[in-house]
Image (spheres, helix red, strand yellow):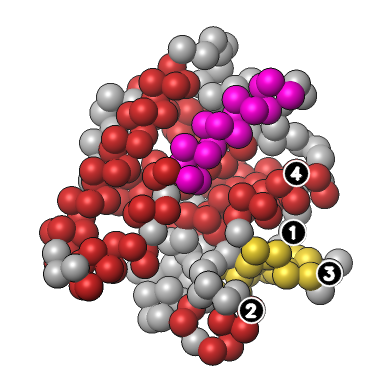
Amino acid sequence: MTTTLYGYWRSSAAYRLRIALNLKGVAYEQVSINLKDGEQNSEDWRRVQPQGLVPVLEHDGQRLLQSPAILEWIEETWPQPALLPSSAQARCLVRGWASVIACDIHPVQNLRILKAIAGDLGQGPEGMKAWAQRWIGSGLQSLETMVATHPRTTPFLHGDAPGLAEVYLVPQMYNARRWGADISNCPTLLAADEAARALPAFRDAEPENQPDAEA
């Protein structure tokens, strides 16, 4: 069965899927949808993804949309190694942490939102940068408060190995550094991010290591 990831090298949501597939040991092909050039707005792509977004994961002829749903599908299709803890309470905890990024941080600093801030609302590049810094910084600081009180014996946010929390965290930390957001008050997140990025599954998923990465 062929697995194809339609994405873009700097897409946070596509980055999540690359990490998850790598952690599961699933081989996949990549097809680039160039967000910078507006390819996501083409009629051809809109027929695949009516919102004009990436990623889309195609597996055995079926096209799957929206990274949170796709990540759950990946976990159910390839259960090992598990991205989620074994207990229902712990799974809820980790999903809650992931949702801070998926629901509260990422959507308001998505490329189409930032372009609207800069262009449609007339704030220009500096306004776009200030917006990204504000919501990424405040969001990650709130997440730090949530995770810091959880007992742990490794740098990872839950358990002895990276899981769903790091799948969401690492791409968002990449964006934080890209936009210059202040994350100095997030030592727990910084430690988890550093430990995860040292692993091949995360390193191979990094934006600059993708075939469509721009110099």
- Toward the front, the furthest residue is 121
Q: How far apart, in angstroms, are the residues tagged by discs 4 and 2?
A: 23 Å
What residue did someone put label 1 on? 27
Q: Does the rendering let one see residue 160?
A: no
Q: What stretch is highlighted in magenta?
A: 88-103
Q: How many labels does the image show?
A: 4
For the residue marked with disc 1, what is the amino acid?
Ala
Q: Does the magenta stretch include residue 90?
A: yes
**Which circle's residue, 1 or 2, is located before the other in the chain?**
1
Q: Which of marks 3 and 2 is in front?
A: 2
Q: Which residue is drawn at 37% across and 75% down?
A: 36
Quick one: 118 or 152, which is closer to the camera? 118
Q: Is mark 3 on a helix, strand or loop?
A: loop
Nearest-to-viewer mark from 4 and 2: 2
Nearest to the observer: residue 209 or residue 170: 170
Mark 2 lies on residue: 48
- Within 10 Å of the Cα at label 3, are there few (<14), some (14-19), or many (20+) other Cα atoms? few
Spatial CA distance of label 1 from label 2 is: 22 Å
Query: What residue is disc 4 on?
Result: 75
Is the stretch drawn in magenta largely helix, strand or loop?
A: helix
Which residue is tagged 3? 60
Q: Earlier in the sequence, mark 3 or mark 2?
A: 2
Residue 141: percent from left, percent from top: 33, 29
Q: Earlier in the sequence, mark 4 or mark 2?
A: 2
Distance from Cα at disc 1 to Cα at disc 4: 15 Å
Amino acid type of the residue that numbered disc 2 sits on in the rendered structure: Val
- The earlier-in-sequence mark between 1 and 3 is 1
Q: Disc 3 versus disc 2: distance between alpha carbons?
A: 16 Å
- Going by the image, does 84 lie left or right of 45? right
Marks 4 and 2 close (CB-CB < 8 Å): no
